[in-house]
Image (cartoon, helix red, strand yellow):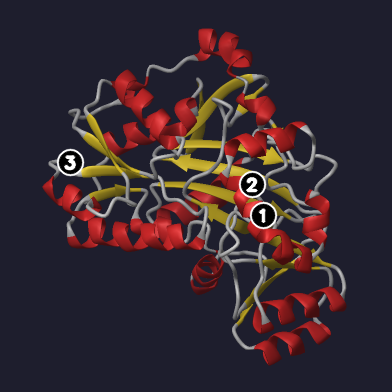
Amino acid sequence: MIKILENSLLLRKLSSRLITCIRSNKSIKIKLKKLGIIGGDVWAVNKAEDQYKELYAKYSVNFESLIKSDKQKVGLIALQDDEANVYFKKSCRELKLDYEIFDPVDEAFIEKIKSSDIQSFLVRPSHKTQLFRQMFLEKIDMVANELGKEIYPTFKEQKIYEAKRSLAYFLQTNNIPHPKTWVFYNKEQAMNFVENAPLPIVFKTHNGAGASGVEIVKTKKQAMALIKTSFDSYYLNKAITDFRDIDYGYVLFQEFIEGAREHRIIKIGESWIGHEKALNGTSEFMSGSGINLWTCPTNEILDFCREIAEKHNFTTMCFDIFEDKHGNFYVNELQTWFGSYNPSQMYIDGVPGRLVYKDNEYRFEEGLFNHNGSVSLRLVDILNYKRN
């Protein structure tokens, strides 16, 4: 079923209302997964908490001891059904923090923020549809820039989160190495480009995680079909989260880097964490494959990411980096939130931990620093470093 939808633009449109209905009905979705009609969760194995009991017994981290400042009440801005709510509540209890949660869908959201005595807010932006993503940006803009509250991640970091056009402009403007990207708002220009474009080439939508809006274009015919769909009608990504969540009036193509390795480097405050991604044997994309290689990142790739972070004052950022056959690095994605279920996103010889850059070197510290989906570490960073 999944493969058929991936390969047919027309079938996605014809089946979109039904699929949206299925995706919004939890019981139906579970039954269809059991029957193998729709795909399962590639990260399911990683979610089984029992497998981490021995690691926690040996490598648990006392996050409260990492707090260097006075404790304060903190807020979370997130959708009511986002799993970040669970992680946030658990983290606050463990850190002995008072907290309050704000749902931006609530019509009274702005008034509730205005009347709150909270100054620092952790934000878990949603991108499940473009509408929700836009709503977050509009409301977070008011919270940060009009009400003067501290938001984490920063508004700048959230603007390029799951926003591939914005990210392309940001990387191009700041001369940050990245796969060459072309964004067309003119159908004729796009078609002229494809006539002489090097193939394969990558097609991407503005929004969409886990490669749901990514297609590797191998023929001119395929490229033309995507252009015509995007300009004459509309494009619907493979996830079909909502049949109304469509893309039209533009196309984004990106250079395909043959044989590239992909690294994930994560910055949360002073912590640096990294590993290499891999294919699962059934997908063309490493994003969302469910497979990680626990290889220690080199100083070269850490420096590449750290210099970008320092220049742009990133508080927390996940760098997805391509490395070509010649050892050159290219930023593929910058995501201020990342999906993870393993309590560590770095293992060196089987030992979980993080790197801290100090005195011009990266020092390894043991521990499960991705505890609670990294929310605990983020809260520590919020408390330790006032940025307003």
- Asked whether disc 2 touches disc 3, contact meaning CB atoms under 8 Å apart, the reply is no
136 and 1: which one is in front? Answer: 1
- Check disc 1 and report the residue beneath it: 18
Mark 2: which amino acid? Ile
Mark 3 is surrounded, within 10 Å at the Cα level, by few (under 14), some (14 to 19) or many (20 or more) other residues, namely: some
Helix, strand or loop status at disc 1: helix
Query: Earlier along the polypeptide chain: callout 3 or callout 1?
Result: 1
Task: Please say if 193 is above or below 14.
Answer: below
53 and 277: which one is in front? Answer: 53
Mark 1: which amino acid? Leu
State whether residue 291 appears in this view.
no
Q: Is residue 235 left or right of residue 258?
A: left
Q: Position of residue 4 (x, y in %)?
A: 83, 55
103 and 198: which one is in front? Answer: 103
Task: Please say if 190 is above or below 245.
Answer: below
> Residue visible at 41% across and 53% down?
310
- Check disc 3 and report the residue beneath it: 118
Query: Earlier along the polypeptide chain: callout 2 or callout 3?
Result: 2
- Check disc 2 and report the residue beneath it: 22
Instruction: Report the Cα–Cα distance between label 1 and label 2.
Output: 6 Å
Q: Position of residue 239 (x, y in %)?
A: 66, 53
